[in-house]
């Protein structure tokens, strides 16, 4: 999975949100930690361990 591309799409507004299941959440978190615009990404945990990521404060 190309999480870098997904994060770019979130920040650009191309994607409104991205949902990741609990089993894949750690891999996405590793990518977010190294992402240059991580201050624009926020996650909301759902029941069952899934996380929904959205972009915030992108200046657009």
Image: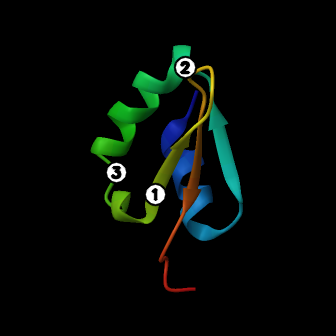
Residue ID for mark 2: 22
Q: How much space separates mark 2 and mark 1, taking CA atoms? A: 18 Å
Q: Residues within 10 Å of mark 3 (few under 14, many from 20)?
A: some
Q: Nearer the viewer, mark 1 or mark 3?
A: 1
Which residue is at the front of the view, 8 or 56?
A: 56
The image position of residue 3, as x and y in percent, is 52, 38
Residue drawn at the location 28% of the way across and 45% of the way down: 34
The image position of residue 2, as x and y in percent, is 55, 34
Residue ID for mark 1: 41
The image position of residue 27, as x and y in percent, is 42, 24
Compared with 34, 28 (above or below) is above
Mark 3 or mark 2: name the one nearer the start of the chain: 2
> Tag 1, which secondary structure?
strand
Which residue is the extreme one toward the front? 47
Using residue 52 as the reference point, say whether residue 43 is left or right of it: left
Compared with 28, 54 (above or below) is below
Which residue is at the front of the view, 36 or 58?
A: 58
> Tag 2, which secondary structure?
helix
Residues marked 1 and 3 touching at CB (< 8 Å): yes
Using residue 58 as the reference point, say whether residue 17 is left or right of it: right
Residues marked 3 and 2 touching at CB (< 8 Å): no
Mark 1 or mark 3: name the one nearer the start of the chain: 3
Q: How much space separates mark 3 and mark 2, taking CA atoms? A: 20 Å
Residue ID for mark 3: 35
Residue drawn at the location 49% of the way across and 85% of the way down: 59
Which residue is the extreme one toward the top? 23
Which color scheme did the rendering employ for the protein?
Answer: rainbow
The image position of residue 13, as x and y in percent, is 66, 68
Which residue is the extreme one toward the bottom? 60
Compared with 44, 59 (above or below) is below
Res. 51 image quadrant: top right
> Tag 3, which secondary structure?
loop
């Amino acid at each position: 999975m190309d999480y870098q591309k997904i994060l770019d799409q979130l920040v650009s507004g191309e994607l409104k949100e991205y949902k990741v299941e609990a089993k894949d959440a750690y891999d996405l978190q590793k990518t977010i930690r190294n992402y240059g615009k991580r201050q624009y990404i926020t996650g909301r945990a759902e029941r069952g361990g899934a996380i929904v990521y959205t972009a915030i404060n992108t200046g657009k």
